[in-house]
Image (cartoon, rainbow, N blue to C red):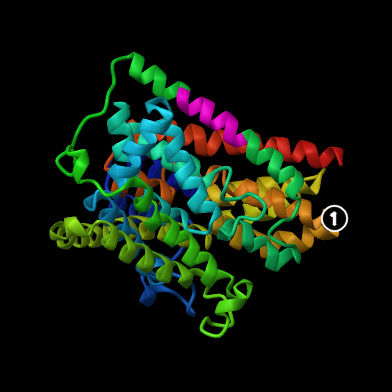
């Protein structure tokens, strides 16, 4: 009982401190410490009996493990985003979009840019860096409240694209190794759910933005924004799309080298996996520098800003991952997992609840799947669940409660990338990345029950 109280209390404390503006580097270990103390975990390695888990080792294993896995991606992604801003490429594309489709579609342009990159396989963390400069220029041109930029970035990245059939994001790929399915599992239902989430979410986002504008909110300039008032000095807009295209194309080539027969002699035989992002982002940054060569004098500062932003962003995320690493060691966490597996009724509903709850506790969609699937997959397959349907259910479910305020992506996007506060930005982010996916999950379960 004490462990359960501590786990729920620790999570509530983490969310409360995050929303109140407490630095996540302090909030996450404090909340994790509460979880550890109420679950009887030793605080330090020398205090652990018979090499049992301890708070400090578990927290730092989660923290440093994520840092080691993703630092280069964060670094290159942040630098790429800064170059896009300093070169004028983001401003040029923004002005072109506004001129062609009108400022009323500025929000749609940001969402679509994120969706294309996410479905193309660029990590959702990197998408925020890559599209932020474009979003700033679009929101400036449309004079929209910038506190909605995190919501537009998150909606285009972690909802209707991240967990859809065919997506190369890890949240759609993890179930394959446990269920023997493909990335296109249950694609018919997935397509319906994706269209529903995209339409509903966009209408909702537009409603929130328009209501804020009607109340008198508008875009507020910051000293850190890269301004390009003289349009004649901007690179040609179609040329400025090349850096984004380069990131997407190079990633796909190195992710699926066997599909490019003409280059098979010089490409590796196997996929580079997540390291394809390093090659892609490096290529995109090089193209962005070439496109904005006339602004080369500003590039050293852009590199420095990108490096600092990358460290802040990844450390914020690591702090939350550390909390999840401690939480999953507690008796309450294991009991909750066992209780969910014992739920009567449709196995798909049980699996959806299990993954949703674990993703919420750990603040990670991929973490929720990685922890839950090895335990629940055999159980629900034996209970008669269709593997393809289970795959799609688990994927969609992982993208719901994972986006609570303490989620690493949410903290990184709101704080490090956009420079906003949770109080200002999270209501819109939570609406689009928690409520909309839950509705999508309900629709998916309803469709599967009718099949």
Report the front residue among 295 and 316: 295
Give the image location of residue 334, x and y in percent: 61, 58
Left/right placement of residue 30 relative to residue 442 reads left
Report the front residue among 186 and 39: 186
Left/right placement of residue 310 relative to residue 325 reads left
Give the image location of residue 387, x and y in percent: 79, 57
Q: Residue at x 31, y 48 (%)?
A: 236
Q: Residue at x 38, y 39 (%)?
A: 150
Q: Residue at x 72, y 55 (%)?
A: 391
Left/right placement of residue 358 relative to residue 449 reads left
Most frequent secondary structure within the magenta stretch:
helix
Among the 4 quarters of the image, the one containing residue 271: bottom right
SS class, disc 1: loop
Q: Which residue is mark 1?
A: 383
Circle 1 residues within 10 Å: few <14, some 14–19, many ≥20: few
Report the front residue among 224 and 67: 224
Asked if residue 84 lies in the magenta stretch, the reply is no
Q: Which residues are magenta?
A: 197-206
């Amino acid at each position: 009982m004490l462990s359960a109280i501590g786990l729920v209390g620790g999570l509530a404390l983490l969310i409360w401190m995050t929303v109140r503006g407490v630095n996540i580097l302090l909030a996450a270990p404090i909340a994790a410490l509460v979880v550890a103390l109420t679950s009887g975990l030793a605080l330090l390695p020398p205090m652990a009996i018979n090499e049992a888990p301890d708070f400090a080792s578990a927290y730092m294993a989660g923290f440093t493990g994520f840092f080691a896995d993703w630092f280069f991606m964060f670094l290159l992604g942040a630098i790429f985003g800064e170059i896009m801003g300093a070169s004028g490429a983001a401003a040029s594309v923004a002005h072109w979009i506004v001129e062609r489709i009108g400022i009323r579609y500025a929000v749609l342009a940001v969402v679509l840019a994120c969706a294309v990159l996410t479905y193309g396989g660029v990590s959702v963390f990197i998408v925020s860096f890559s599209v932020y400069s474009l979003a700033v220029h679009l929101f400036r041109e449309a004079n929209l409240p910038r506190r909605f930029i995190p919501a537009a970035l998150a909606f285009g990245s972690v909802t209707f694209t991240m967990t859809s059939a065919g997506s190369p994001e890890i949240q759609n790929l993890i179930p394959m190794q446990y269920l023997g399915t493909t990335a296109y599992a249950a694609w018919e239902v997935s397509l319906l759910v994706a269209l529903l989430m995209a339409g509903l979410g966009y209408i909702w986002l537009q409603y929130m933005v328009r209501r804020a504008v009607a109340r008198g909110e508008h875009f507020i300039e910051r000293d850190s924004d890269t301004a390009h008032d003289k349009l004649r000095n901007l690179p040609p807009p179609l040329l400025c799309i090349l850096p984004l295209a380069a990131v997407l194309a190079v990633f796909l080539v190195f992710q699926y080298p066997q599909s490019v027969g003409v280059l098979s002699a010089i490409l590796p035989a196997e996929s580079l996996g997540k390291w394809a992002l390093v090659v892609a982002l490096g290529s995109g940054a090089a193209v962005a520098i070439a496109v904005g060569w006339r602004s080369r004098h500003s590039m050293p500062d852009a590199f420095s800003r990108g490096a600092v932003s990358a460290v802040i962003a990844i450390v914020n995320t690591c702090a939350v991952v550390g909390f999840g690493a401690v939480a999953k060691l507690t008796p309450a966490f294991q009991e909750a997992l066992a209780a969910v597996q014992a739920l009567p009724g449709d196995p798909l509903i049980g699996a959806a609840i299990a993954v949703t709850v674990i993703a919420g506790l750990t603040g990670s969609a991929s973490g929720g799947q990685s922890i839950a699937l090895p335990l629940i997959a055999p159980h629900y397959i034996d209970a008669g669940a269709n593997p393809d349907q289970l795959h799609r259910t688990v994927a969609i479910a992982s993208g719901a409660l994972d986006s609570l305020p303490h989620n690493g992506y949410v903290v990184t996007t709101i704080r490090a990338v956009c420079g906003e506060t949770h109080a200002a930005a999270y209501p819109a982010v939570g609406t689009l990345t928690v409520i909309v996916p839950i509705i999508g999950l309900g629709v998916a379960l309803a469709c599967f029950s009718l099949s």
